């Protein structure tokens, strides 16, 4: 049997909010939360100071702005054009290249996107720090090797790891690609690249 309102003890009555307390809680809830901004030195900026704060996604960082990406795209389109001509002369056949997509990505996402099997060349620039990665689809690599060995250069649909001989032949092609890339980003001899290794997986 439930108690009537008259039978509520003093403790229950003290737990009931009056209208002024309810209004205060509602006004506090409607206020925007205070944003605490710290300077690089760890000092808190005054609340009255007007700051222009932009959101930044550290998990998906933007490495280049729109204008910078436009300039990089122009350079890569020129690189692809001249590389197509050089590979045509190198393979003694029509070799057409087209830039389909240009984007920046964190190293971890790039590694996850590489299929297996594949053909990876590792290279270094004498004037720059770090190691570069050039990934070539093994089907394309085998088609190029077939042409280098006197074949017609028809597309090969087989998916397998490249042999040591095929990787050695592909190194000559990689050197052509890197040499042309260096030409597009500097004066002749200003930037040079060296192949430091190959990987299949």
Image (cartoon, grey):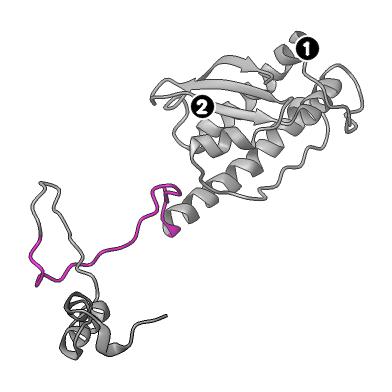
Quarter where residue 129 is shown: top left
> Would you say residue 40 sits in the magenta stretch?
no
- The crowding category of the residue bearing disc 2, from other C-alpha atoms within 10 Å (few below 14, some 14 to 19, many at least 20), is some
Residue 47 appears at what percent x and percent y?
10, 69
In front of the other: 124 or 158: 158
From the viewer's perspective, tell me whether residue 151 is left or right of residue 185: right
Front residue of this view, candidates 78 and 130: 130
As for residue 53 lying within the magenta part, the answer is yes
**Magenta segment range?**
45-66
Residue 66 drawn above or below residue 123: below
Q: Quadrant of residue 53?
A: bottom left
Q: Position of residue 180 (x, y in %)?
A: 58, 32
Instruction: Name the residue carrying label 1.
Output: 163
In primary-sequence order, the first of circles 2 and 1 is: 2
Residue drawn at point x = 23 percent, y = 77 percent = 12
Name the residue beneath numbered marker 2.
132
Seen at 34% across and 60% down, the residue is 55
């Amino acid at each position: 049997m439930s108690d009537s309102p008259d039978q509520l003890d003093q403790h229950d009555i003290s737990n009931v909010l009056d209208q002024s307390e309810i209004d205060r809680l509602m006004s506090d809830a409607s206020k925007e939360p205070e944003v605490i901004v710290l300077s690089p030195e760890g000092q808190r900026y005054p609340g009255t100071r007007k700051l222009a704060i932009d959101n930044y996604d550290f998990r998906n960082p933007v490495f280049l702005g729109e204008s910078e990406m436009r300039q990089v795209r122009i350079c890569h389109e020129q690189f692809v054009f001249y590389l197509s001509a050089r590979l045509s002369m190198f393979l003694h056949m029509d070799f057409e290249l087209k830039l389909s997509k240009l984007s920046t990505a964190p190293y971890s996402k790039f590694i996850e996107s590489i299929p297996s099997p594949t053909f990876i060349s590792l290279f270094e620039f004498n004037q720059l720090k770090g190691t570069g990665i050039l990934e070539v689809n093994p089907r394309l690599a085998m088609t190029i090797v077939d042409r280098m060995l006197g074949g017609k250069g028809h597309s090969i649909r087989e998916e397998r790891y490249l042999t040591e001989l095929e990787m050695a032949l592909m190194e000559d092609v990689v050197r052509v690609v890197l040499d042309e890339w260096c030409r597009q980003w500097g004066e002749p001899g200003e930037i040079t690249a060296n192949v430091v290794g190959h990987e299949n997986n």
